[in-house]
Amino acid sequence: MKLELRGITKRFGSLVANDHIDLVVEPGEIHCLLGENGAGKSTLMNVLYGLYRAEEGTILLDDQPQLFDGPGEAMRAGIGMVHQHFMLVPVFTVAENVMLGHEPTRAGGRLDLDAARAMVRDISARFGFDVDPDAVVEELPVGVQQRVEIIKALSRDAKVLVFDEPTAVLTPQETDELMGIMRQLKAAGTSIVFITHKLREVREVADRITVIRLGKVVGEASPTASNAELASLMVGRAVELTVAKAPSTGTQDALVVEGLTVRDASGQPVVDDVSFTVRSGEILAIAGVQGNGQTELTEALLGLQERVAGRIRLDGAELAGATPRRILDAGVGFVPEDRTEDGLVAGMTVAENLMLDRSSGAPFVRRGTVQRAALRDFAAEKVAQYDVRPASIDAQAGQLSGGNQQKVVIARELSRPLRLLVASQPTRGVDVGSIEFIHKRIVETRDEGVPVVVVSTELDEVSALADRILVMYRGRVVGIVAGDTPREVLGLMMAGEHAGGEEHAA
């Protein structure tokens, strides 16, 4: 099916999110929509999907004008959408989620769950998804949940499939699997709109690339274009794709972790006797495939895990067993891996989110009353300093793009005196210009003498930031090696193989 958008314009008050955008997607084509966070990519696709009504412009499918009053009409016309934040009911099974909204029925109006199961099995077999129709969604890995979203769209005979930042929450392995799925869909004749800001993914699967900046189409590019060319077109300026930093000069151990063990609800160790140190003015990056204990490790450092043994000392003071409040007050900054669940309160304003760590005292609270003038001045300064792009500081944080939400979290955590920064997946779902900005801020924090722990599944990020790299596998430390260790060696270590290095752990 051929998709054509002509002159699409969408406004939110005085903000023009889409400004007369033209886009053509040919049948069986992977067309990449590339742009910064907040450029208007998702808004454009929400117009296509019937979630928003454009003030101007026309949608055509196979040259026939369309007007969608909601997603139901878009789906019936052959449009499917896989959202960045999945639209699944966690407590439902895969089959129940797939049938939701167009439930097959038997005689007497009874739900035909067997028909839904058969549909899941059929689509799974066709594309090699290996999804159990009776599995409960909340018990599935993120990558499998995404396949459920794809099955939902295909079960409704989608001819045009929109992927909105589909790799933002995926591991590198899951991302590679998704790329393979997209190629299969293309081979089957499905037209794909792929929204992303990750340059490697664009060059890997796109047939054509349209770049949007500040709500306007600023050009088209070939997948053969260099990363530097794509980044420049996307951001509107030259972008440094490598992190410039001097060698660490830290010599004093600031954070000392000894024999740290974290157990899950069943008593099994998910972090198993982990020991390491981080020097003042040093970045220790923790690498590993998602699910090997990194999340539980960072949560233990912040007092968010209950079943913890071992010692955690910061500048000689014991933090093991302390409450999160005490740990934050001790000068620990925390960028959690899931900003929507743990980093922000979506219903609070941007300004209110910027003061969350300091909501109990000066300068923002006095005698139990929020000092609005001080908060507004602070928020306006940080929004400008960290290039956050809300409609206003009074906009709800949940209304921001993913990258702008991340910059709010980064701004809050780096805007107070720190003795330790723990940043988990600091650039997940963030565009190349914002990645450059966040990396610079992390390096600046390290250069101020603060010890930094960065957890990332992106090897490019690990290699760019790290002075030393700790690799985890199944909850244990495989080894601690220099920051310039080759990717190939790190990849083997992430699979559980030991490698020589400056330090070594069993």
Image (tube, grey):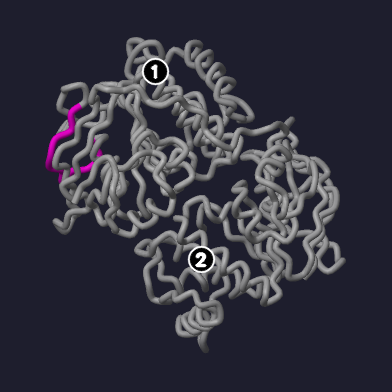
* Name of the residue lying farthest toward the bottom: 107
> Above or below — where is 273 with respect to 413?
below
Q: On the image, numbered disc 2 is attached to which residue?
A: 177
Q: Which amino acid type corresponds to the residue marked 1 in the rendered image? A: Glu
> CA gap, disc 2 to disc 1?
40 Å
Residue 99 located left or right of residue 471? right
Q: Pick whichever of labels 2 and 1 is earlier in the sequence.
A: 2
Q: Where is residue 62? Give x, y as percent.
A: 83, 69
Question: Residue 305 lies in magenta, yes or no?
Answer: yes
Crowding at label 2, few (<14), some or many (≥20) Cα neighbours within 10 Å? some
Q: Where is residue 330? Give x, y as percent.
A: 25, 21
> Above or below — where is 214 with respect to 132?
above
Q: Residue at point 17% right, 54% down?
A: 269
Q: In the depicted view, which residue is nearer to us: 435 or 278?
A: 278
User: What range of the chain is rendered magenta?
Assistant: 303-313
> Above or below — where is 177 with respect to 95?
above
Crowding at label 1, few (<14), some or many (≥20) Cα neighbours within 10 Å? few
Q: Residue at point 44% right, 74% down?
A: 131
On the rendered image, what quadrant is the N terminus found in? bottom right
Q: Secondary structure at mark 1?
A: loop
Q: Is residue 341 visible?
A: no
Q: In the depicted view, which residue is nearer to us: 472 or 41?
A: 472
Q: Secondary structure at mark 2?
A: helix
Q: Residue at point 55% right, 38% down?
A: 403
Q: On the image, numbered disc 1 is attached to which residue?
A: 448
> Above or below — where is 274 with respect to 332?
below
Q: Where is residue 114? Give x, y as percent.
A: 46, 84
Q: Which amino acid type corresponds to the residue marked 2 in the rendered image? A: Glu
